[in-house]
């Protein structure tokens, strides 16, 4: 939804004839990026749901838990990364928007930040438990870095 609001605002801005050529070109590039990020987010959210179902099933059967757990961590991390990228794009679009469209971008940022925090919490919860390869520490550092970046946007 946050990416969709950003795309909507971008398309409205592109429809304005007074938009200067350089700004139009930057906006088109950012809108293309945002469209791609929207598609990625939709895919990652579906993958996350599938990974969660697979983890629950693996835990019930007590087979394949490490691989299912790994996947249940990777998916929300991808959501965190992608929402962070989308927030950066929306920030680049924001100066072109006036107060009315700016409020839509503000709502989009809030939605993306909510999606980030939800995915962050999911990844952290799924990291609980044994970590035989020591990847949990690396992923936690990565997530904390992402979180700091997202909170600054």
Image (tube, rainbow, N blue to C red):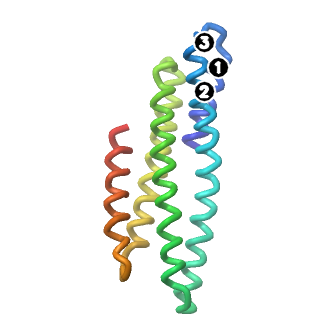
Instruction: Measure the C-alpha gap from mark 1 to mark 3.
Output: 10 Å
Residue 140 screen position, x and y as percent: 34, 63
Residue 14 is labelled as 1
Asked whether disc 1 touches disc 2, contact meaning CB atoms under 8 Å apart, the reply is yes
Q: Which residue is mark 3?
A: 21
- Tag nearer the camera, 1 or 3: 3
Tell me the mark number nearer the camera, choosing from 2 and 3. 3
Where the C terminus falls, by quadrant? top left
Towards the viewer: 81 or 104: 81
Q: CB of mark 2 within 8 Å of CB of mark 3? A: no
Graded by Cα atoms within 10 Å as few (under 14), some (14 to 19) or many (20 or more), the crowding at tag 1 reads some
Q: Position of residue 47 (x, y in %)?
A: 61, 64
Give percent across and percent down for residue 11: 65, 26
Tell me if I can see residue 129 in this picture. no
152 vs 96, left or right, is left
Q: Which mark is residue 54?
A: none
The answer to which quarter of the image holds residue 6 is top right
The residue that appears at 45% across and 45% down in the rendered structure is 84
Circle 1 SS class: helix
- The one nearer the camera, 139 or 116, is 139
The residue at the far bottom in this view is: 62
């Amino acid at each position: 939804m946050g990416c969709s609001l950003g795309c909507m605002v971008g398309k409205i801005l592109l429809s304005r004839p007074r938009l200067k050529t350089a700004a139009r070109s930057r906006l088109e590039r950012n809108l293309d990026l945002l469209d791609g990020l929207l598609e990625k987010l939709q895919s990652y959210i579906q993958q996350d749901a599938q990974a969660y179902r697979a983890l629950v099933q693996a835990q019930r059967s007590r087979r394949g838990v490490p691989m299912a757990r790994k996947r249940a961590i990777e998916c929300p991390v991808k959501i965190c990364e992608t929402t962070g990228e989308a927030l950066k794009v929306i920030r680049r679009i924001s100066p072109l928007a006036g107060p009315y469209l700016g409020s839509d971008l503000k709502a989009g940022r809030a939605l993306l930040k909510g999606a980030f925090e939800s995915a962050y919490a999911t990844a952290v919860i799924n990291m609980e438990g044994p970590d035989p390869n020591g990847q949990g520490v690396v992923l936690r550092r990565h997530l904390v870095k992402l979180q700091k970046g997202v909170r600054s946007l």
